Amino acid sequence: MFADSLQLPYPLLSDYPDLEIMRRYGVLTFSGRYPHRFFFLVDQRGIIRGRWHGEDAGVFANEPLLKAVQEIAGEPAEGAGAKKASAK
């Protein structure tokens, strides 16, 4: 399974092929057969704290998600999204 292959310390939600949760979250394409790529940040109480739409099937930048998590956790979010200097 895709989610298992990532070995993340948090759960990923996908209800494909049932699509019930995808319908409720409003992420299905106009055809209603496939989802758009969205990321939702859900806190420990089940409250949606953020929603991001991935523009394509590529890798979604994690900086906006990390910044939001740090802000919710009360940690400073300085430098989130900043590019690292390349070593030459």
Image (cartoon, rainbow, N blue to C red):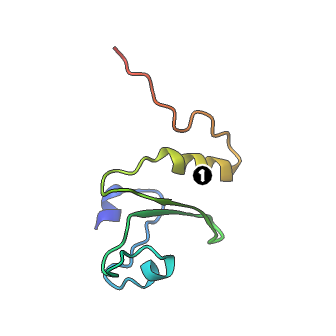
In the rendered image, which residue does mark 1 sit on? Answer: 69
Q: Is residue 2 above or below residue 34?
A: above
Q: Residue at x 53, y 47 (%)?
A: 64
Q: Quadrant of residue 43?
A: bottom right
Viewer-proximal residue among 48 and 12: 48
* Extreme-front residue of the structure: 30
The kind of secondary structure element at disc 1 is: helix
* Extreme-right residue of the structure: 74
> Image check: 56 left or right of 27?
left
Q: Residue at x 35, y 85 (%)?
A: 18
Q: Quadrant of the N terminus?
A: bottom left
Q: Quadrant of the C terminus?
A: top left
Viewer-proximal residue among 75 and 8: 75
Residue 24, x across and y down, in percent: 50, 82
> Image check: 67 left or right of 31?
right
How many numbered dots are placed on residues in this image? 1
Q: Residue at x 51, y 32 (%)?
A: 82
Residue 59, x across and y down, in percent: 34, 50
What is the crowding at mark 1: few (fewer than 14 residues within 10 Å), some, or many (at least 20)? some
Q: Is residue 22 above or below residue 50?
A: below
> Image check: 74 left or right of 85?
right
Q: Quadrant of residue 85?
A: top left
Residue 29, x across and y down, in percent: 36, 74
Q: Is residue 28 above or below residue 7?
A: below
Q: Quadrant of residue 80?
A: top right
Q: Is residue 11 above or below residue 81?
A: below
